[in-house]
Amino acid sequence: MLNGKNVVLGVCGGIAAYKSVEIVSRLKKLGAEVDVIMTESAEKFVAPLTFRSISHNPVITDMFAEPINYDIKHISLSQKADILVIAPATANIIGKIANGIADDMLTTTVMATKAKVLIVPAMNVNMYENVIVKNNIEKLKKLGYGFMEPDTGMLACGVNAKGRMPEPQSVIEAIVDTMAVKGDMKNIRVLITAGPTREAIDPVRYITNHSSGKMGYAIAKAAQKRGADVSLVSGPVSIEKPEKITVYNVISADEMFLKVNELYEPADIIIMAAAVADYKCSVVADTKIKKSSDELTLSLVKNPDIAYSIGKKKGKRVMVGFSAETNDLYKNAKSKLENKNMDMIVANDLTKEGAGFNCDTNIVSIIGNNGEILELPIMPKEKVADEILNYAVRVYYQKKESNT
Ligand code: C5P
């Protein structure tokens, strides 16, 4: 998963430093190359030798040590890093970075790097809640530094409060998510459905819904940016065709069904974001229906369920569905997830302001088939798209690893 990626891990002086050994071990197992930089006080908690043995790389502790090879370490590591992670990060290091202080190997590397920086604070609750620390974190967040929230639990000082470093697995997930911006979907083939479908009544009229296609198109663009090979089966929308994405335009649910069944085979991830009409007219009039009687009854029959048909034969593919609801959000979404054999479903409550059809934002929860629920705040559809892809990519690799 992290093959060929360079992670530089900064370790500061906190009791949680022992957990960072496990982080290095997991990063190595995922294929990453890891360089560890320790602050002077970190060495009081864990010996550099421990990190050296696990990372198989010399551990950098002293800025003025004789170089092992003749490059200037803080420059070479800052350039080599695909991501710089600081875990645990103390109030001290956060304060130094926020104020541009570069007085040891770790802070110098942070100042010199252009890579993403992910900071994982761990400290006493009163320190974490200190307004100076809070302001420093806010300042750094605004500058684009990534932060993880500390966990709540027993702290080294004996109180049960917020301040614990998150468990290594969560840190790994945050690292993977943070790096996601850079080609993490290379060689992954994604098939997406988007937009509404139109079900003809006669040659001039049709039944449809309010779907704009924005969510599905945002996912397609985000996946393409992340290196995926994207095919998009789109109902009628008024969005410009995105670059470098193969778009198959369809009108009705029947056409979408045929196209998706024709294209699903090579896909690794299938994302069903289309709002497919559930019913179509049982007979489509050949000529325009005339305004004659006072009442007109249309007879409707069920459309094929595309997601259901693919879910039955999806094999190793990751299938992502959507569930737009006006009531019983989780109950309805979970039953669709099960019925259609999806790996995950994106549930949105259409009654909320800023969610659903025809707007630029969305408020969704992602539900995994393991029961996990990830509730996301209101955010632009582009950001929602990335969150959905982060989750889908994680499931893709989990499936790949476990061979299911
Ligand atoms: O059952 P419901 O239509 O609400 O399920 C929504 C999910 O199923 C969405 O992911 C949608 O794209 C997909 N779907 C489909 N074919 C249908 C109806 C829905 O693929 N005929």
Image (cartoon, rainbow, N blue to C red):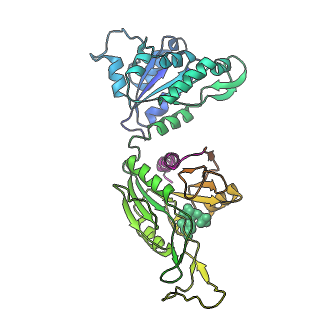
Residue 34 within the magenta-colored segment of the rendering: no
Classify residue 70 as left or right of residue 299.
left
Residue 50 in the image: state x and y as whole percent: 48, 19
Q: In this orientation, does residue 316 appear?
A: no
Number of marks in picture:
0
Residue 241: quadrant of the picture: bottom left
Q: Where 135 sits versus 243, above or below?
A: above
Q: Where 196 sits versus 281, above or below?
A: above
Q: Where 267 sits versus 161, above or below?
A: below
Q: Residue at x 67, y 18 (%)?
A: 126
Q: Quadrant of ligand 1?
A: bottom right
Looking at the rendering, the stretch of residues picked out in magenta corresponds to: 378-404
Q: Residue at x 32, y 22 (%)?
A: 76
Q: Looking at the figure, which quarter contains the N terminus?
A: top left
Give the residue at the far bottom of this rendering: 292
Residue 150: quadrant of the picture: top right
Residue 380 within the magenta-colored segment of the rendering: yes
Residue 332 in the image: state x and y as whole percent: 67, 60
Q: Residue at x 36, y 50 (%)?
A: 187
Residue 237 in the image: state x and y as whole percent: 46, 64
Residue 239 in the image: state x and y as whole percent: 43, 59
Classify residue 58 as left or right of residue 172.
left
Give the residue at the far left of this rendering: 70
